[in-house]
C-alpha cells in the first residue's frame, strides 16, 4: 500500500489568494471603521458542567469597540454576578463553575453586541446547555427463554443524555459482542437476532452508553438469554408430562423473512440538507435474510452512498433535495422476501446564496447590500441596523430597503453603520453582519515595494497588490519599467488587485508594476517574479512486507531546480526516525537492517524546498509466525469432557487464523502428540471431548499466514476413568479369499479407544436367509478371523463387537458379506447380432442365472475379431478385441467395425474371480461402405492437347468398386477456375488419356472411386499441357546458334584437358585410392537419370535438382499416395498377381492395364527449361 502526499505550490497560492481577498475588504486599522465580529461561540453550545463556561465574542473596529451581552432577550449585567467576568479588550465571558457555580443556573440564550461610534455588530444567538449523562433507571430484567431459530430483540433504552450517548454491547469481560448478518445492533441501540442459535445462550448481554462530553460510560444491568434446542426442549416437556400426555416440540423450521424494524410496509423520514441520511431495515427469518436497497424511480447517488451494519443500514452523506423519494429495502432468503418503503423528504435550513458584504463608500457614492438565502421552506429575510430592527432604527435618507436588498444613494459620513441580515425558517436561521463605512481616502498600496515572488513552473503565479482607497481605486498592471499595460487571456485580474498568471512559464519572469488611482490621487509599486523548476519524486517508496530479521530498503529519488536546495527527511509514523544504527539514510534511500517488530509502520520521504514540498509514503509490515499461546488452564473436568483455555501469543502482524489443539496419551503412547481439534483464531477456549482410560495432556499451536507457532507448554495431566468400549471396530467386511472360506476383517480400535484394559473382539457370523444361530468366537486384539468350510459364494451376516475388562461395547451393526467366489459355470445364451450400419453392430444376449455366476456379477465381455475382408478375400492376422459392459446388461454396441468384412464374436460373463466360458462364436458381416480415396494419381506424357492419367485403386475399397469419377477444369493465370468437366470411368481401368485439351494450360483434376453405397473421398492434382510448336521450334533454333555451339565446344575442351591431367597423375602415382574405394563400394541407391524422358514434372526451386534415391518415400513423379494401411500388404495379395512397384506401392490386382511403370526419376522436378523442351521433341 503506497500513499502519496504532495503539497503543491498551487494550493499554497490559493490559500494566499483567499487571505488577500479578505484583507482587500478590510479597512486599514488607522482609519475609522464600524465593528466586525471576528470570533464567536457556536449557536448550539453544549458545555461540560464540571468546567468553567467560556462564551467567546471577539471583534475589531476603529475606535476599538465596547461589548455588552443579553441573556434570554434582556440585558445581562455581568457586574452583578461575581461568577461572571469579561476578558480585557474582549467581549468573551468566563463563567466560573469550578469555584462553586452551577452550570444549570447559566442555561439560556446569549447574544453579544460590539459597538463604537460608527455602528454596532451582533453575534448569533448562542444557546448554552450543560451536557447530561444520567444513570440508567432501575428495572427488573427477566431472563429471555427463546426457542432455537426464533427471532429476538434485546432492548437497550439508554437514558436521555445531552448530547445523545454512543451505544455498544459488551460482556462481563468488557469484550465487544461479535456481530454478523444474523446478530446486529440497530440505530436505536437495540440488539437484534434474526434467528437465535444455541451458542447465543449467555447471561451477560450488557448495553453500554458512552457520553463523550463528560467522558463517562453508563452500564445497563446484564440481560440473560437461554436458547432451547429442540432436543433439550423435548426432554424438558417430557419430564413434566405424564405418559398419557402428547408432547413434542416442533423441529427447527425455516421461515421466510419478517421485518423487525421498521414495522409495517411504509414509513416516512425527514432529513435536513447537508446532513447524513441513515435508513435501516432489520429482518427476522431462517436462513438469515439478506438485505438489498433500491430507490424507486431512480438510482442511489454514486460516491455518496454507503452500506453499513451488514447492508442493514443505508447511509447517504451530504443529502440534497434531489435525494428525496421512496427508498425500498428488500429482505430475502430461500423461502421468500418482504419489503418496506421509506418515503424520504429532504428539508433545508437556510443557506446562503449571496451573503451581504462590507461596503466602503466615499461621500456621494451609491451602493447596495444584498442578502439572499434559500431553504425548504423558503426562509424569510429581515434587516437590522446596528442590532435594531430597521423599521424602528433611526432614519437614514440615503438608504432604501427593497426585500433582500438595501439600496444606498448619495451617502454621507453619517450613513456609516452595521447592518444585520437574518434569514430564518422552521429549521434554523442565518445571521450576517455587513458594515457601510463612508470614507474619503486617496489610494494606498499595502504590498511592500520590490517584493520578490518565486513560483514553481506550471503553477499559478499570484502577484499581490493589496490596496485601499475611497472611492475604490482602479488597478492597472505593467511588465517592465516602461512596459505596456497588461491585457489578454493569459492574465487574470482580481478585484483585490492581485495579478494572476494561471500557468507561469519561464518567460513570465521579470519586473511587474502595479498602479492604483482614484480621484484623490495615484500610487504605484514594483514586484519581482522568478520561475523555478518543480521538485519531483521520480521514484517513490513502495509498500513492503518483510519477515522478521530481514533487510528492507525504501527508495526516494528526486529531481529539483538547481537554484533550490532540497532537504530530504524520512519520518516513521509522522515522527522522527528512531536513533538506531540499523537505520541507514542514504542519498536517495532508507535501509533498515535486521528488521524487528517495532520497525513496523509508515515511512514517509519528505522533500522540502523554499517553494514547494512533496512527499511519498509507504507502509512496512513486519510479519512472523505467531508466538506460542501460554497459560493453558483445564477447567470443568468431567468423565467425557473438559474445558481448555489459553492466552494467545503475539500474532506478529499476521492475524491468527486458527488454533490447533493436540493431546498426548501418556498411558498408551507417551511422547506422541496427536491432533485433537482446531478452533477459529478468534476463540481462546474449547470444550474437548475425552475418552475413558486416557492420561491426557494438551498443548496449543497458533496458526497464521506465515506459518505455525511453536507449541505451547503442555497443560497439566488429566487421567480419565476406565469404561467399557464406546464404539466397535469400523470397516467390518466379510469377503472370501477361497471358494470355501469367509475372511472377516475389521479396523482395530486405537489404544485410547479401548476405554480400559483387556481389549478383545467378539466375532459373530451366520448364513443369511437360513434359520441358523449365530456362531461367535472371542479373539485377541487382532484384525482378521477366517471361517473355513463355507459353501461357495453365499451371503453371511457378520458383526464384530469390542469388549474389555469392564464390559462390552454397544451391540454392533450387522454387515452382509459373502464367502469366496468361483469362476462362472455357464456362458450367456441366445447371442444375437444386429448390424446397424457398415461400422456399427448391436449385440444381444440372455443374462446368465445369478446362481451360475458364483460370485459378484461384474459384467459381460464381448470378444470379437475380423475374419476377412469380403472385397479382397485375403487371409489376415487375427487380432481379437474386447469390450466390457459393466453390470447386468443384456446388450452392447460394437463400434469401429470395418465395412464389407466378416466378423466373429462370443460373449462371456465376468465375476470377481474371473471370466466364465465363452458362448458359441457368432458370425456376422458388415455391409459395403464408401471407399477411401485412390491410393495415388499420377499425370504423365504432356503434349500440346493431351495428358495421361494413371491411378491406384483405394487402399480400403470397403466394398465392390463400381466406377471412378474424374472431374477437371482449367486454371488461368489469376488462379480462377474454368468450367468443370466430369468423366465416368469403369472400375477395372487404371489409366486414361485425356485429349482435345488446350495447349500451355494448367488443369486441376478431382478423382474418386465409387461403390454401390456412394462416392469416397477424392484426390486432387494439377498439370500443364506443353506450349505450341512454334515456341518449341524457337527453342530448337536457339540450340543451333553459333555462339551456343562454340560455348559447348569450349566446355568439352575443358573436360578433355581435365581428363588428360587425371590420367597423367594416375600413371605417375599408381592407382587413385579414392577411385578404388568408389569401385569397391558402389552406392546401390544411386540411379541414372534418363535425359530423354518426356514425363511432365512439377515446379520446384533450382536447389531441388537432385536425383532421387531408389526406395525414397517421396516419389519423383506426380504420384499422390495415402498412408500405409494398418494391415499387412501380404494379406491383401493373391498369388503371383501381388506385385509391388519400385517405391513400394501395391499395384498387383488393381492394375487395369498390364503396362510397365515408368522408371523413377524420369520426370524433372521443375518446369521444363528450353533445352529440356527441345530434347523432349527430338
Image (cartoon, rainbow, N blue to C red):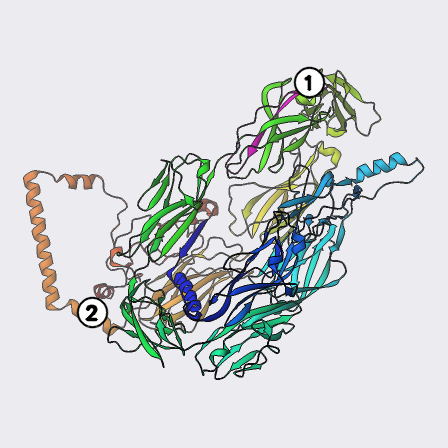
Q: Is residue 383 visible?
A: yes
> What is the x, y in percent for residue 516?
34, 76
> What is the x, y in percent for residue 556?
35, 48
Which is more N-terminal, label 1 or label 2?
A: 1
In the image, the segment drawn in magenta is 693-721
Most extreme residue toward the right, as rendered?
A: 244
Quarter of the rendering containing residue 887: top right
- Magenta stretch mostly in which secondary structure? loop
In this rendering, the count of numbered labels is 2
Per the image, label 2 sits on a secondary structure element best described as helix
The quadrant of the rendering that contains the C terminus is bottom left
Q: Is residue 541 visible?
A: no
Residue underneath mark 1: 781
- Between residue 680 and residue 1022, name the one nearer to us: 680
- Between residue 1010 and residue 759, name the one nearer to us: 759
> What is the x, y in percent for residue 608?
35, 53
- Between residue 648 and residue 126, name the one nearer to us: 126
> What is the x, y in percent for residue 74?
65, 65
Quarter of the rendering containing residue 248: top right
Residue underneath mark 2: 1035
- Tell whether 817 sits left or right of 406: right
User: Residue 698 in magenta?
Assistant: yes
Per the image, label 1 sits on a secondary structure element best described as loop
Amino acid at each position: 500500500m503506497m500513499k502519496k502526499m504532495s503539497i503543491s505550490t498551487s494550493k499554497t497560492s490559493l490559500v494566499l489568494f483567499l487571505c488577500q481577498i479578505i484583507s482587500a475588504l478590510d479597512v486599514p486599522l488607522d482609519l475609522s471603521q464600524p465593528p466586525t465580529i471576528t470570533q464567536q461561540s457556536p449557536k448550539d453550545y453544549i458545555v461540560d458542567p464540571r468546567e468553567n463556561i467560556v462564551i467567546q465574542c471577539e471583534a475589531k473596529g476603529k475606535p476599538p469597540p465596547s461589548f455588552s451581552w443579553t441573556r434570554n432577550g434582556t440585558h445581562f449585567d455581568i457586574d452583578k454576578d461575581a461568577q461572571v467576568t469579561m476578558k480585557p479588550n474582549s467581549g468573551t465571558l468566563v463563567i466560573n463553575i469550578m469555584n462553586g457555580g452551577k452550570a444549570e443556573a447559566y442555561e439560556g440564550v446569549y447574544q453579544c453586541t460590539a459597538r463604537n461610534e460608527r455602528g454596532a455588530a451582533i453575534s448569533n444567538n448562542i444557546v448554552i446547555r450543560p451536557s447530561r449523562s444520567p444513570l440508567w433507571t432501575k428495572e427488573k430484567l427477566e431472563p429471555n427463554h427463546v426457542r432455537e431459530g426464533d427471532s429476538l430483540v434485546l432492548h437497550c433504552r439508554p437514558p436521555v443524555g445531552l448530547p445523545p450517548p454512543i451505544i455498544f454491547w459488551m460482556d462481563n469481560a468488557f469484550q465487544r459482542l461479535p456481530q454478523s448478518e444474523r446478530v446486529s445492533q440497530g440505530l436505536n441501540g437495540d440488539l437484534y437476532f434474526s434467528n437465535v442459535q444455541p451458542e447465543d445462550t449467555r447471561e451477560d448481554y450488557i448495553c453500554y452508553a458512552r457520553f463523550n462530553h463528560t467522558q463517562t460510560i453508563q452500564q445497563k444491568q446484564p440481560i440473560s438469554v437461554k436458547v432451547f434446542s429442540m432436543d433439550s426442549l423435548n426432554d424438558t416437556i417430557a419430564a413434566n408430562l405424564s405418559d398419557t400426555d402428547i408432547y413434542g416440540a416442533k423441529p427447527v423450521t425455516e421461515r421466510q423473512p419478517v421485518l423487525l424494524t421498521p414495522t409495517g410496509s411504509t414509513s416516512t423520514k425527514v432529513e435536513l440538507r447537508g446532513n447524513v441520511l441513515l435508513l435501516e431495515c432489520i429482518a427476522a427469518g431462517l436462513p438469515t435474510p439478506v438485505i438489498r436497497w433500491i430507490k424507486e424511480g431512480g438510482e442511489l447517488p454514486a460516491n455518496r452512498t454507503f452500506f453499513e451494519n451488514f447492508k442493514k443500514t443505508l447511509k447517504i452523506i451530504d443529502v440534497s433535495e434531489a435525494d428525496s423519494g421512496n427508498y425500498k429495502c428488500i429482505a430475502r432468503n430461500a423461502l421468500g422476501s418482504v419489503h418496506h418503503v421509506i418515503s424520504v423528504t429532504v428539508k433545508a435550513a437556510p443557506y446562503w446564496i449571496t451573503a451581504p458584504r462590507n461596503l466602503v463608500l466615499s461621500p456621494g457614492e451609491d451602493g447596495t447590500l444584498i442578502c439572499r438565502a434559500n431553504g425548504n421552506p423558503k426562509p424569510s429575510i429581515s434587516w437590522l441596523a446596528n442590532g435594531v430592527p430597521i423599521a424602528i432604527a433611526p432614519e437614514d435618507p440615503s438608504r432604501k430597503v427593497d426585500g433582500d436588498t438595501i439600496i444606498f444613494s448619495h451617502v454621507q459620513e453619517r450613513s456609516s453603520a452595521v447592518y444585520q441580515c437574518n434569514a430564518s425558517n422552521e429549521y434554523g436561521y442565518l445571521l450576517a453582519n455587513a458594515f457601510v463605512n463612508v470614507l474619503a481616502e486617496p489610494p494606498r498600496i499595502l504590498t511592500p515595494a520590490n517584493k520578490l515572488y518565486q513560483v514553481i513552473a506550471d503553477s499559478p503565479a499570484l502577484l499581490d497588490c493589496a490596496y485601499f482607497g475611497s472611492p475604490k481605486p482602479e488597478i492597472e498592471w505593467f511588465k517592465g519599467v516602461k512596459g505596456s499595460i497588461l491585457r489578454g487571456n493569459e492574465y487574470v485580474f482580481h478585484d483585490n488587485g492581485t495579478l494572476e498568471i494561471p500557468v507561469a512559464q519561464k518567460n513570465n519572469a521579470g519586473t511587474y508594476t502595479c498602479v492604483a488611482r482614484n480621484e484623490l490621487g495615484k500610487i504605484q509599486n514594483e514586484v519581482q517574479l522568478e520561475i523555478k523548476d518543480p521538485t519531483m519524486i521520480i521514484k517513490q517508496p513502495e509498500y513492503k512486507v518483510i519477515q522478521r530479521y530481514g533487510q528492507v530498503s525504501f527508495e526516494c529519488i528526486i529531481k529539483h531546480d538547481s537554484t533550490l536546495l532540497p532537504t530530504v527527511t524520512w519520518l516513521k509514523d509522522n515522527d522522527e526516525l528512531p536513533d538506531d544504527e540499523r537505520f541507514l539514510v542514504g542519498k536517495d534511500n532508507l535501509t533498515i537492517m535486521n528488521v524487528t517488530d517495532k520497525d513496523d509502520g509508515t515511512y514517509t520521504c519528505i522533500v522540502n524546498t523554499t517553494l514547494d514540498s512533496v512527499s511519498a509514503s509507504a507502509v512496512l509490515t513486519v510479519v512472523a509466525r505467531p508466538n506460542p499461546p501460554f497459560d493453558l488452564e483445564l477447567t470443568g473436568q468431567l468423565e467425557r469432557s473438559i474445558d481448555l483455555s489459553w492466552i494467545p501469543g503475539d500474532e506478529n502482524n499476521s492475524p491468527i487464523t486458527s488454533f490447533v489443539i493436540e493431546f498426548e496419551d501418556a498411558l498408551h503412547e507417551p511422547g506422541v502428540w496427536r491432533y485433537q481439534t482446531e478452533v477459529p483464531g478468534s476463540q481462546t477456549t474449547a470444550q474437548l471431548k475425552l475418552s475413558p482410560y486416557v492420561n491426557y495432556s494438551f498443548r496449543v499451536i497458533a496458526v497464521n499466514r506465515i506459518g505455525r507457532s511453536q507449541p505451547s507448554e503442555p497443560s497439566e495431566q488429566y487421567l480419565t476413568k476406565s469404561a467399557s468400549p464406546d464404539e466397535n471396530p469400523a470397516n467390518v467386511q466379510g469377503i472370501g479369499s477361497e471358494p470355501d472360506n469367509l475372511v472377516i476383517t475389521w479396523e482395530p480400535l486405537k489404544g485410547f479407544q479401548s476405554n480400559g484394559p483387556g481389549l478383545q473382539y467378539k466375532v459373530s457370523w451366520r448364513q443369511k436367509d437360513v434359520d441358523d444361530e449365530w456362531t461367535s468366537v472371542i479373539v485377541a486384539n487382532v484384525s482378521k478371523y477366517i471361517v473355513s468350510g463355507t459353501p461357495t459364494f453365499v451371503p453371511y451376516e457378520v458383526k464384530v463387537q469390542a469388549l474389555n475388562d469392564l464390559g462390552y461395547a454397544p451391540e454392533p451393526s450387522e454387515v452382509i458379506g459373502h464367502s469366496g467366489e468361483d469362476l462362472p459355470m455357464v456362458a450367456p445364451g441366445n447371442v444375437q447380432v444386429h448390424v446397424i450400419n457398415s461400422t456399427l453392430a448391436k449385440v444381444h444376449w440372455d443374462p446368465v442365472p445369478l446362481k451360475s455366476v458364483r460370485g459378484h456379477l461384474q459384467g459381460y465381455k464381448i470378444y470379437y475379431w475380423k475374419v476377412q475382408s469380403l472385397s479382397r478375400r485375403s487371409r489376415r492376422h487375427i487380432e481379437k478385441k474386447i469390450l466390457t459392459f459393466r453390470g447386468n446388461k443384456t446388450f452392447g454396441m460394437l463400434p469401429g467395425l470395418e465395412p464389407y468384412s466378416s466378423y466373429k464374436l462370443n460373449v462371456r460373463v465376468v465375476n470377481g474371480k474371473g471370466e466364465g466360458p465363452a458362448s458359441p462364436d457368432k458370425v456376422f458381416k458388415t455391409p459395403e461402405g464408401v471407399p477411401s480415396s485412390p491410393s495415388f494419381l499420377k499425370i504423365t506424357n504432356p503434349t500440346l492437347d493431351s495428358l495421361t492419367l494413371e491411378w491406384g485403386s483405394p487402399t480400403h475399397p470397403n466394398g465392390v468398386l463400381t466406377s471412378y469419377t474424374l472431374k477437371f477444369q482449367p486454371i488461368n493465370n489469376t488462379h480462377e477456375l474454368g468450367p468443370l468437366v466430369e468423366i465416368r470411368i469403369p472400375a477395372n481401368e487404371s489409366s486414361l488419356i485425356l485429349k482435345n485439351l488446350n495447349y500451355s494450360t494448367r488443369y486441376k483434376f478431382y478423382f474418386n472411386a465409387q461403390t454401390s453405397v456412394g462416392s469416397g473421398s477424392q484426390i486432387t492434382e494439377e498439370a500443364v499441357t506443353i506450349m505450341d510448336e512454334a515456341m518449341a521450334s524457337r527453342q530448337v533454333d536457339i540450340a543451333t546458334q553459333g555462339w551456343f555451339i562454340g560455348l559447348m565446344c569450349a566446355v568439352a575442351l575443358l573436360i578433355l584437358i581435365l581428363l588428360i591431367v587425371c590420367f597423367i597423375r594416375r600413371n605417375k602415382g599408381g592407382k587413385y585410392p579414392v577411385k578404388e574405394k568408389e569401385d569397391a563400394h558402389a552406392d546401390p541407391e544411386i540411379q541414372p537419370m534418363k535425359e530423354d524422358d518426356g514425363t511432365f514434372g512439377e515446379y520446384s526451386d533450382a536447389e531441388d535438382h537432385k536425383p532421387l534415391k531408389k526406395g525414397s518415400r517421396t516419389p519423383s513423379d506426380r504420384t499422390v499416395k495415402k498412408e500405409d494401411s494398418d494391415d499387412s500388404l501380404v494379406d491383401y495379395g493373391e498369388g503371383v498377381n501381388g506385385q509391388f512397384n519400385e517405391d513400394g506401392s501395391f499395384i498387383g490386382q488393381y492394375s487395369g492395364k498390364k503396362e510397365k511403370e515408368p522408371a523413377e526419376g524420369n520426370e524433372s522436378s521443375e518446369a521444363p527449361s528450353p533445352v529440356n523442351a527441345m530434347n523432349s521433341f527430338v
